Image (cartoon, rainbow, N blue to C red):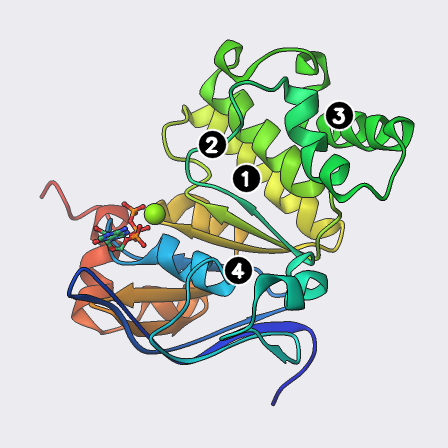
């Protein structure tokens, strides 16, 4: 079934440098169903997000944002659909030469639809939501890793997207930082945002998502709930879950 409130991949193939990253990959993110894509480092998780955003073109297969197939389209012709999705990149990807406030308001400023006063209000609201409003005039180099991630989330929220993609949002954070990011994701979900996270951090995945996709050797090896994953008999899935089942050091 195709609905306007989903983002989908159908039989997507993608290779780079002679290596197959995705092969006949089917994927579906429904609005309101928060999902995590799991997979080892280098499996192709970030690649999936870039394909879904139209930042990469698949070799074959189709990608839909809502009812619109974006494959082969110029970004300008799917701006309206693309605007419904924001991404928090793996490293935060803040502009070093801009203050926190400028980073968060940058996209709205570029779009030129709102006055400076309106943008300033939105910037402050989003920074307050993530709890770093005091950092408004600081530069990224003056922030801790956890603060950078929060600013990156505030920037993603600025355009009021329906979907937010998180690329490894907890990597490099201490346990309190991880907890805070999880709490933020849950608050976003309560506010009606749909989150798609890619990570190999199982604890964060289980704390914030209802559905899980496991990517392995270019294919979707598993799709299901946490309970289904934990009793899944696929050897690669069991291997991936092993560090959480207490057997690793036995
Ligand atoms: N520009 C590129 N040129 C060649 N290979 C690339 C390029 N970009 C990515 N790759 C390769 O594609 C594969 C998938 O990369 P991707 O970044 O999607 O992995 P990932 O699952 O996000 O990994 P991680 O968990 O480490 O972030 C990797 O093996 C990577 O080396
Ligand atoms: Mg990655």
Asked whether the beta carbons under mark 1 and mark 2 sit within 8 Å of each other, the answer is: yes
10 Å crowding of disc 4: few (<14), some (14-19), many (20+): many
Q: Which mark is residue 53?
A: 4
Dot 4 or dot 2, earlier in sequence: 4
Give the mark, 1 or 4, whose residue is nearer the N terminus.
4
Asked if disc 4 and disc 3 are in contact, CB closer than 8 Å, the reply is no
Point 64% across, 41% down: residue: 156
Give the residue pinned by disc 2: 178
From the image, state whether disc 4 or disc 2 is nearer to you: 4
Residue drawn at 87 percent across, 39 percent down: 114
Element type at mark 2: helix
Give the residue at mark 1: 182
**151 with respect to 124 (left or right):** left
Reply above or below: 233 against 237.
below
How far apart marks 2 and 3 lie (CA) works out to 19 Å
Camera-nearest label, 1 or 4: 4
| Residue 106 image position (x, y, % from top left) | 68, 33
Q: Is residue 185 left or right of residue 80?
A: left
| Tag 3 residue | 128
Q: Position of residue 190 (x, y in %)?
A: 73, 50
Is residue 108 in view from this perspective?
yes
Q: Quadrant of the C terminus?
A: top left
Q: Say which mark, if any, is on residue 33.
A: none
Compared with 4, 119 (above or below) is above
């Amino acid at each position: 079934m195709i609905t306007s409130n989903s983002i989908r991949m159908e039989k997507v193939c993608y290779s780079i440098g002679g290596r197959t990253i995705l092969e006949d990959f089917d994927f579906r993110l429904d609005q309101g169903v928060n999902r995590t894509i799991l997979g080892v480092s280098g499996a192709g998780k970030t690649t999936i997000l870039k394909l879904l955003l139209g930042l990469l073109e698949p070799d074959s297969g189709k990608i839909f944002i809502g009812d619109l197939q974006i494959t082969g389209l110029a970004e300008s012709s799917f701006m309206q659909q693309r605007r419904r999705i924001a991404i928090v990149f793996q490293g935060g990807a803040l502009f070093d030469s801009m203050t926190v406030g400028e980073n968060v308001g940058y996209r709205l400023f570029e779009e030129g639809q709102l006055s400076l006063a309106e943008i300033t209000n939105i910037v402050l609201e989003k920074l307050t939501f993530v709890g770093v409003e005091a950092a408004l005039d600081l530069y990224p180099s003056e922030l801790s890793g956890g603060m950078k991630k929060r600013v990156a989330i505030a920037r993603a929220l600025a355009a009021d997207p329906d979907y937010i993609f998180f690329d490894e949002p907890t990597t490099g954070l201490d346990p309190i930082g991880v907890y805070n990011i999880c709490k933020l994701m849950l608050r976003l979900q309560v506010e009606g945002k749909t989150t798609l996270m890619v990570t190999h951090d199982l604890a964060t995945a289980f704390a914030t998502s209802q559905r899980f996709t496991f990517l392995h050797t270019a294919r979707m090896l598993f799709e299901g709930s946490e309970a289904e994953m934990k009793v899944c008999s696929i050897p690669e899935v069991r291997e991936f879950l092993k560090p959480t089942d207490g057997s690793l050091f036995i």
